[in-house]
Image (cartoon, grey):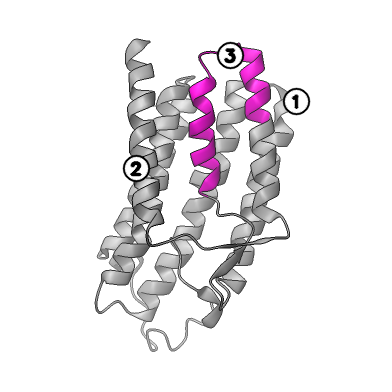
Amino acid sequence: MKTDSSIIDMNTPEGIEGTKRPIILSFLVDWANLVTLMGLASGILSLYFALNGQFQAAVLALLWAVLFDWFDGPIARRMRGRTEGQKLFGMKMDSLVDVISSATIPGVLLVAYADFSPWFYPGTLAIVMAGVLRLAYFDVYGVDKDGTIAGISMDFTPLAVAGVFLLEGPLSHDAFAGLFYGVVLLMAFLHVAPFRMRKLSGIWVPIVTGYVLALTTAHSLILWAD
């Protein structure tokens, strides 16, 4: 999860760490950044499974990518002594990982499920472009003073995809592919739609955790049955 980046000039690193530039790998000595990278690892694992046609396994890995994303923010806020450079680096990295895990991978999962049909390419393009637009907007404007954000958070897409995938068995391949396509297009619109929602935090952390664990169990049982 992200903090309000609107109060920081993201393009002026001078003064954040003085005149000395830290080495890149020094940012690994940070629990929040490591959790973000664990989310990236889960996302790339999901991508691997999707490209190999193991769609239930891909959904499982994608769920955990979201869970790691939900916990890197609370961990960062509880860490003492983080420098402004570490905070900015973590925020930037979080957005980049979100583009991969919450936009690119659901898009790839869609087109892979459709046997890479060119008719599904617009859906993949829509969700990735919506993700880039929304996260760029958020990096500039952040959270408003009233605690609201523009559109819905990117992590709603993998959560929605994981929920919809419970119908993959009961429906025919073509019927489910059409449903999946529609869900992805809807989520792409909602990410950039001109409305505002309250940023989810606090009680929503255990709610999302419970949702991920419940769907992890459900999809694990489906995998086991197969």
Provide the residue designation for mark 3. 171
Q: Nearer the viewer, residue 146 or 178?
A: 146
Range of the magenta residues? 155-181
For the point 66% across and 16% down, the residue is: 175
The local secondary structure at tag 1 comes to helix
Q: Label 3 is placed on what type of residue?
A: Leu
Which picture quadrant has residue 195?
bottom right
Name the side, left or right, on which 82 lies relative to 129.
left
> Could you tell me if residue 28 is visible in this image?
no
Could you say where residue 85 lies in the image, as x and y percent from the top left? 39, 77
* CA distance separating discs 2 and 1: 35 Å
Provide the residue designation for mark 2. 210
Q: As displayed, is residue 89 above or below residue 207?
A: below
For the point 53% across and 19% down, the residue is: 168
* CA distance separating discs 3 and 2: 26 Å
| The magenta stretch spans residue 10 | no
Nearer to us: label 1 or label 3: 3
